[in-house]
Structures are given as C-alpha cells and as structure tokens.
Image: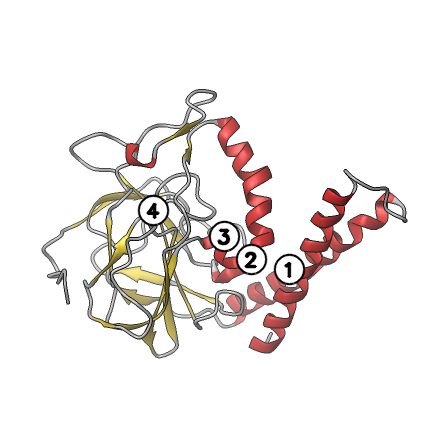
Amino acid sequence: MSVDRRKIAAKIQYALWVVFFAQIVARFFVELPYNYWVSWLPALGAMGIGLVTARSARHRIETAPPAPVAVAPPVTGRWSAVNSPADKVPSHGTHNLAQTYAIDIVAEPAEGPARPAPVWFWPVARRNGDYPAFGAPLYAVAGATVVHAEDGQRDHLSRSSLAGVLYFWLVEGVGRTMGGSRRIVGNHMVLDLGDGTHAVYAHVRRGSLRVRPGDEVEPGHLLAQCGNSGNSTQPHVHFQLMDGPDLETARGIPFTWHGVGVPAAGEAFTVDASAPARPQDV
C-alpha cells in the first residue's frame, strides 16, 4: 500500500471512529432518526480498514521483511522491557502508527526505590514520581536531525490499579483516539537518522525538551526526559523506528540496540552511562 493510500485510509478510519463515538454521545440527548444497528456501521467500516491495512503490513513482513537497524539505546541505567518485538510482531498488537516493532521499557534500578507493583483496588492511581522512570534522561540513538518535537501535553497520574486501568482504556483511551495520533503518543520526538530511517520517542515528560525541530544531534545527545503523557498507564519509554516522519503513514522498521540487542518482555538490561560518552549540552 502506497504512502498516499495509507494516508487516505488513516483519514477515513479516523473520521469513521469520530462519527461512531459522536452517535453514542448524541443518543444520551436525542433519539437518532435510524435504527440502532445502523449506528454501528461506521465502527465496522473503521475496523474493516484496519484489517485491510494490517493484512498489507503482514504481507510486506512475510514477503520482504525489513532488515534491523542498529542504534544505541535511548537510555542509561537498568531497565526492563514490557512490550517487545522479541516476543511478538506487531509488538503492541497493531501496525497502526508504525508500531510494528515498537518497544516499551520501564526503569528497574538496582538501588533505590523499586517500581510500584500493580494492585487490584488501592491506590487507584499513583504520582508519577513514585516510578523511577519518570524524569529519566532520553538520549539520541544516532547522529540525526530533529524533525518533530513537542512537550506541551500534561503528564497524567499513573494507573496503578485494575479500576484505574479500566478507566484508562474505556474513557481516556476513547478520548485520545478521538484526538488523533498526537494524543495517543503524547509528547514525542521524531528524529531523522538518514537513509529513510526515523526514530520515535513517545510519552515524553512535559516541559523537558532540550531540542527543537531542525536541530542536529550526535549520538548520546540529551533530548528530553521520560514522562507519562498520552496513552500511557505509567512512566515508561516507548521507542520505535519507522520509514518516514509521519506516524500515520510510516511503516515500522526493526531495531537492535548496541550491546543490548532486543530485550524480551520481562528481561532486564543495563546500559553503562559512560560508554559511549554522552554529551549533555551539545
């Protein structure tokens, strides 16, 4: 599927979801002039487009799988993977927003307070500062040009309980879907690594950006901090590579991190802060 077709499909799919959810809200106030089952047609159409685009992505992977691109890890210290392409592809259950080979990692420091474990009921939510990933520095994984960078969205509370997660998916998730891709990834950066490869850092901390679009960065350049903005239940780093700068039309590219590889879910790994050297204020 060409870039133009993917763009059109994304726009139509988004419009159909907006119509579907708008009907749900409207039914609370007025009686719609058609049968209830008709209101599900936009949702079915949106899901149909999703199936077609997913089939196209699977065909591409099966017939001409892209080669992994080796880059440096975007963090230092001890971390572990949550969702990883080492376990399944697509790693997040969808090819949407070029997430085919995306990875989520959380901080697991060897010393100091540990990451809070999930609970059933209480506390429903936690402060982001309770999580060691919040505020962790994010670094450039290669020499690159910054093509997009934004950090104006808020960092919401972490959803630490079953009730919090259900609210996150059923209420916040719907609202962010209506808001488009930037509301899903939250504050984020896109770096052009050259040769058609782009790196994405999602859920960045509000107000933490150290770069702006057009900046040239070297490997290890301090970019921003890990946050909890967008579609995120707790502070974590969402990282992915893709073949274009636009999340809605690009396709995912597999990665491997120097000295680490691709950690599987639950696998802990450590990145030495001194190798390679990481300039703080280039």
**Which amino acid type is shown beneath numbered disc 2?**
Gly
Residue holding disc 2: 180
Give the alpha-carbon distance from disc 2 to disc 1, as whole Å. 8 Å
Q: Which residue is mark 4?
A: 227
- Counting residues from the N terminus, which is met first, the one under dot 4 or under dot 2? 2
Residue 244 lies left or right of residue 71; in this view the side is: right
121 versus 72 height, above or below:
above
Q: Position of residue 263 (x, y in %)?
A: 32, 49
Looking at the rendered structure, the kind of residue marked 3 is Ile
Quadrant where the C terminus lies? bottom left
Instruction: Choose top left, top right, bottom left or bottom right for residue 236.
Output: top left
Indicate the position of residue 1 as horizontal and vertical percent values: 60, 74
Left or right of 263 on screen, residue 72: left
Q: Is residue 226 above or below residue 141?
A: above
Question: How many neighbours does mark 2 have within 10 angstroms: few (below 14), some (14-19), or many (20 or more)?
Answer: some
Contact check, label 2 and label 1, Cβ < 8 Å: yes
Q: Hey, which quadrant is residue 66 in on the image?
A: bottom left
Separation (CA) of disc 1 from disc 3: 13 Å
Q: Amino acid at mark 4?
A: Gly
Q: Earlier in the sequence, mark 2 or mark 1?
A: 1
Please give the residue where the numbered disc 1 appears in the rendered image.
Answer: 14
